[in-house]
Image: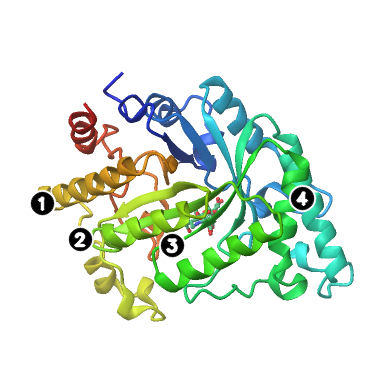
Amino acid sequence: SLDSFKGVLNNRFYIGTALSNEQLIREDNKILREAANQFNAIVPENCMKSALIHPQKEVYNFTLADRFIEYGLQHDMWMTGHTLIWHSQTPDWFFKDSNGNEVKRDELIHRMKDHITTLVHRYKDFIKGWDVVNEAIEDDGSYRETKFYKIIGPEYINLAFKFAREADPKAELYYNDYSMTLPEKRAGVIRMIRALQRQGIRVDGIGMQGHVNLTSPSIEAFENSIVAYADLGVKVMITEFDISVLPFPNEHLGADINTTVSYKEQLNPYKEKLPDTIQQKFNDRCFDFFKLFLKYDKAITRVTVWGVSDEYSWKNDWPITGRTDYPLLIGRNHKPKEILKQLTTYVA
Ligand code: G3I
């Protein structure tokens, strides 16, 4: 039907949402019903990250991930796995041997293989695409010096894709990262993907995380990147899309902003209510992005927003906790925002 995002965008690309742990735990969950009405794709916001699903060497905890799959099957949704190899939210044990020293290269490769194979095998046929490696490139285009990088070398990326491919030859395998519009970073990502392709490693898609705000990045910069990544012959996905309407405390990074009350108030201007003018800016900005995504719907196979509704978004707690942000497609009143009507008229 046309009163949902999935109805309006049908046949153009999947429109997905992230599901939080809290949402998955609650059985009779209004949010989960809303998600099924509005979206036709899902990704777990946290429950498949290694710290949660593989907390100790011999311990896997599949409860929430299984619940995620069950829900996706029930509603016939495209399911993406997030994320196999990432420097963040990897448990400490991963990099330590039994004496507490840094793990040796061969052993780390073995652990990566065990982790990737176990997850990809378990959810084979259900998870249709995996974020295999997340955020491996710095903003200046160099490799991020993660523990995987330092201990294994840049080949950890090839190996991750190889292990995932062996575990499920049919799944789509992706590279996912943020700030993908920065020219130097884009060049670095393209170098890395080309190097993988030269070595015969198939990468099916690139995920451009879409954590944007009302002004940055420009639509033009975003467009340049969509085109540049699509030119590699891979699918492009807009992942983790949200539009923060709040000020970003750039100039105060490093200061203890959470304890400076007046400053925190200043950075939380829409605590009671979002002014119509800002709401309008959000809708216009969101519409501009969706027009761009629709323009490239041959390359873009999925757009996923990073949360179901404003009430629950990581942006309410980042980079300062306890703010009131309005970054998503569905408001705190649990109604789709004006952007749905704008899109409906636009695609008609
Ligand atoms: O669930 C626990 C709770 O029990 C505990 O009391 C509380 C105290 O800190 O922490 C809760 O866990 C938090 C979890 O979110 C659930 O809210 C973690 O501390 C917190 O670190 C975690 O943040 C997640 C973040 O990744 C971790 O780096 C965000 O939810 C999640 O939205 C965010 O997602 C990432 C993508 O995976 C990759 N790209 C960037 C994106 C935004 O950072």
Rendered view: 152 above or below 208:
below
Residue on which disc 1 sits: 277
**Alpha carbon of mark 3 to alpha carbon of mark 1: how far?**
29 Å
Q: Amino acid at mark 3?
A: Met
Residue type for callout 1:
Thr
x and y percentages locating residue 343 in the rendered image: 23, 34
Instruction: Decide: few, some or many residues near mark 2? Use Cα within 10 Å; few <14, some 14-19, many ≥20.
Output: some
Q: Amino acid at mark 4?
A: Phe
Q: What's under tag 2, amino acid-wise? A: Pro
Residue 314, percent from left and from top: 42, 53
- Along the polypeptide, which appears first: circle 1 or circle 4? 4
- For this view, does 177 lie left or right of residue 210? right
- Would the CB of label 4 be found within 8 Å of ligand 1? no
The residue mark sitting in front, 1 or 4, is 4
- Mark nearest the camera among 3 and 2 is 3
As measured in the structure, the alpha-carbon distance from the residue carrying label 1 to the one carrying label 2 is 13 Å
Of residues 241 and 260, the one drawn nearer to the viewer in this rendering: 241
Residue named by callout 3: 180
Marks 2, 4: nearer the viewer: 4
Q: Which residue is mark 2?
A: 269
Percent x, y of residue 211 = 38, 56
